[in-house]
Image (cartoon, coloured by chain):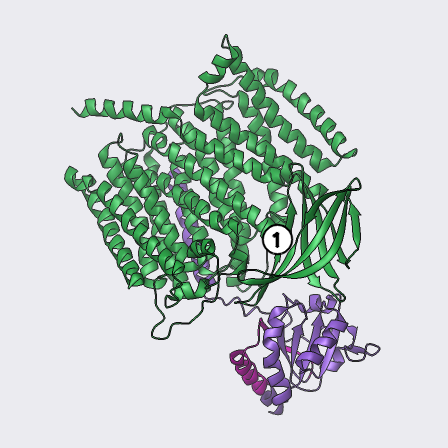
Amino acid sequence: MRKFWIFTPFVAFIAMSVFLFKGLFMDPSKLPSALIDRPFPSFTLPSLYEPDRLMSELDFKGEVALLNVWATWCPTCKDEHEQLNKIGLEEGIPIYGLNYKDDPQLARAWLERYKDPYTKVVVDQEGRLGLDLGVYGAPETYIIDQHGIIRYRHVGEVTEQVWQELKGLMEIIAAEEEA
Amino acid sequence: MIPELGTFATILALCLTLILSTVPMIGAYTGNKLWVDYARPLAKGVFFFLSVAMLLLAYSFQTDDFSVMYVAQSSNYNLPWYYKISAIWGGHEGSLLLWVWIQAFWTLAVAVKSKDLPIEIVGRVLAVMGMITAAFLMFILFTSSPFERILPNPPAQGADLNPLLQDFGLIVHPPALYMGYVGLSVAFSFAIAALLSGRLDAAWARWSRPWTSVAWAFLTLGIALGSWWAYYELGWGGWWFWDPVENASLMPWLVATALLHSLAVTEKRGVFKSWTVLLAISAFCLSLLGTFLVRSGVLTSVHAFATDPERGVFILGMLVFVIGGSLLLYAIRAGSVKSESTFAVSSRESMILVNNIIFTVACAMVLIGTIYPLVMDSLDLGKISVGPPYFNALFVPMMSLMVIFLGISAFSRWKETPLQLYLSKLWLPAILSVVAAVITHWIYSQSIEPWVLLALVLSYWIVFTWGREFISRLRHRDNVIKGMTRQSRSYYGMMLAHLGVAIMIVGVAMVTIFVEHRDARMAPGDQIEFRGYTFIFDGAREVQGPNYISDMARVRVFRDGELYREMFPEKRLYTARGTVMTQVALQPGFTRDLYIAMGEELENGAWAMRLQFKPFVRWIWLGALFMTAGGLLAASDPRYRKQVKREAAQRQQVTE
């Protein structure tokens, strides 16, 4: 009996290293969202441009678009803003903004100063919607299809490289619908 | 030219370690004394060449040689010179070089300090340590050399050291922690050498004890420095986050603590031999695992410096070789070990067994909590994270139990302890600690918080039980002073360390329960009052630092209507990386800290400010310092050297 037990540390370690090996090849920036292929969570929150108007998940239906989670307190959001301007203003891709745990006044000032790539911006001052979405932190960018279904999630800055990847995915999603 | 010499020195060190890990080992097996004798000079040579490599890397940093990729990544012209030193271990490559340099230092220490040990044991131990050094050197040379160049177009300016790491804490935290991590390799090597030679007697435990105490002391210090650094640098005011990387250093500490106690039993009584060997192996394996978890980026955490599967695969391969190999060796060899004596259920042996069980179970719990998210993820069961509630729910009851036994064990004796003895000695400290706890708690807050009360009872319990034991030792002597000087250094070391536990418990409980904070928007002239202090915000102004621009606020603190302190929290923008950092203003004190961190700038010169009142937070690190001092004092006990000499003499006689 003792001979058997004495091997357990060895066996336990080997089992653990299998998981460690698998762990090495998982990309921490590709966090799967629990909501992938699910409809966008329902919400009723004010618009950033017209604080009196309430927006809902229906506002995010109609076309394949990006949803960008951002805030003025987030330095990386500033880094990626240039890229978003390029996508939204030059390439004309619809980007919905989710202004996350932020001061709307500061947010409006920011868009005035750095240009505004968004077609619609919803204000999530309390972070409730962010919680429902499972936001880790700003910035995060989602692809939402024409039926308002979340299709992809990217955590972190949208660089040119990331954008090319996202663009490819958006084209595939759009093509799927036509077929 | 200089960096190439660095690579060359590292290669030479690798060559020497390859000889060190084979020749003396073969010599020990074949009885070739000449070959075994090579071990000591080789250990010195390895240390020499790695020191040269460290100095050359330091030179590249001081001369701003940005053609060296590692320097360009983690330094900058404007970085102050002392951070150019600590930047050596501010990144992946350099911290590995520091790791291996410290490993070479420990190898050298064993080579120099083992004059009285049988040479074939020294040869085996140094060879095992050489193998570990060799593995790490290969890792450095093949995947992460700090001497790699960016040629032909070196950048004109470096990317600067991560601002989080530009701090005194980072100058001292990694070297202390690595001294601890790597120091455990000595006990490991002694254990492996004992397993290989088949002589698993009490002697190896005696040889490893002082080394393990020193390594444990450094590990304690390193963890405490890390916690202190996180407290004042991260700006959240927390001192422990159950972050995977913190856990990675806590796990070897828990096992090393068990090992420290288990070695005592093995040395004195010749029991638990196979178990102690397993602890010695596990303690070092867990520090290797810790290195893997930090360096491979397999667990996402605030500490993750590198996410690079190639490096991860290399370390994992090394881990499988070292850990798997030693556990297999253990399984094959340790089965035949017999105990040299027996003991009763109620005895000091079983007290230490309880200690061992609690600490190993605690370590297993931390390991499960750290690895579980990874396992879930690789089985596609979803991303989850195990948070502080899990660890706290486990740790508080387990450590409370540990402290209860720590008190009881003060009166335990080897072999057998009558239950009446416990009862007759323990009732008084038990009553006293409850009474003293209630009184002190009432004096402090005029209310009773159950958790604080529990902590105070436990803390007094340690003080009173061990205090009574100390007094009864002195009573046997005719004169108190004489009685005090007659106690050994290792006894005082143990007392200090146990007292450290009592101090730390007070700190943890008080700061957790009685912490108070205010998050407020403060415009110039605004004031906030709490816990008897009045904080007046005078506004912030721009200040230029060597490599940053800062908004420095002035907060005047009043106590009883009189100016007590001026505090200057900062929000710094490090220009090279464009990162913003919070510089906390601290007013440390023995019974409380005042802590001010700046948040975001709001309109009209107002700022979001976070003010905290942290009672007894210093006691956490003070307790750790007591433990460190205790470990070092115990290791310096002259009896280890005398005992070793006597044994060596005996052996000599037997062989002659």
Percent from the top left, x then y, of residue A138? 64, 69
For the C terminus of chain B, the quadrant is: top left
Say which quarter of the image contains residue B438. Answer: top right
Q: Residues within 10 Å of mark 1 (few under 14, many from 20)?
A: few
Q: Which residue position holds label 1?
A: B387
Magenta segment includes B462:
no
- x and y, in percent, of residue B139 in the image: 34, 58
- Drawing shade for chain A: purple
Q: Is residue B33 above or below residue A145?
A: above
Q: Where residue B373 sits in the image (x, y, percent)? A: 55, 57
B604 horizontally vs B495: left or right: right
The chain in green: B
Residue under mark 1: which chain is it in?
B
Q: Residue at x 20, y 22 (%)?
A: B653
- Determine the residue located farthest toward the top in the rendered image: B478
Say which residue appears at 65% left-offset and 23% top-offset: B430
Q: Which residues are magenta?
A: A147-173
